[in-house]
């Protein structure tokens, strides 16, 4: 079974449809069992959609990049992760 940390590591590949069918099935099974990871993936998907609507020459403030990196590093917060 996939754990929360692995889901966090694979979320970009998952959203880009760049993982194989077995790994995708494990990923999606974990999402069905872990609401925290499900929300994390939903937020990442929304972020990708939002960023895709920005003009290519958009300047991104440095503090926004730092906050985003901090958020990604924190990952989903799930009590289930402690059990794995």
Image (spheres, grey):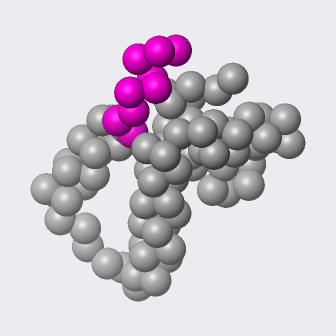
On screen, residue 73 above or below 32? above
Q: Return the residue found at the far right.
A: 21
Q: How many marks?
A: 0
On screen, residue 18 above or below 50? above
Task: Give the residues in magenta.
Answer: 76-84
Q: Residue 51: image x %, image y %?
A: 42, 73
- Identify which residue is drawn at 27% across, 52% down: 68
Q: Residue 21: image x %, image y %?
A: 86, 42
Residue 81 in view here = yes
On screen, residue 15 above or below 48? above
Q: Residue 6: image x %, image y %?
A: 56, 28
Residue 10 in view here = no
Foreground pick, 49 / 4: 4
Does the magenta-highlighted stretch encompass residue 32?
no
In the figure, residue 17 lies in which quadrant? bottom right
- Image position of 29 (left or right of 52): right
- Identify which residue is drawn at 56% across, 36% down: 7
In the figure, residue 26 lies in which quadrant? top right
- Identify which residue is drawn at 70% across, 40% down: 29
- Image position of 21 (left or right of 31): right
In the figure, residue 60 lies in which quadrant? bottom left
């Amino acid at each position: 079974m996939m754990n929360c940390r692995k889901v966090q590591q694979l979320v970009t590949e998952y959203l880009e449809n760049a993982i194989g069918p077995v790994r995708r099935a494990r990923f999606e099974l974990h999402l069905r069992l872990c609401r925290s990871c499900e929300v994390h993936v939903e937020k990442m998907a929304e972020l990708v959609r939002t960023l895709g609507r920005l003009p290519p020459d958009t300047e991104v403030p440095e503090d926004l990049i730092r906050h985003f990196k901090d958020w990604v590093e924190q990952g989903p917060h799930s009590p289930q992760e402690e059990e794995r």
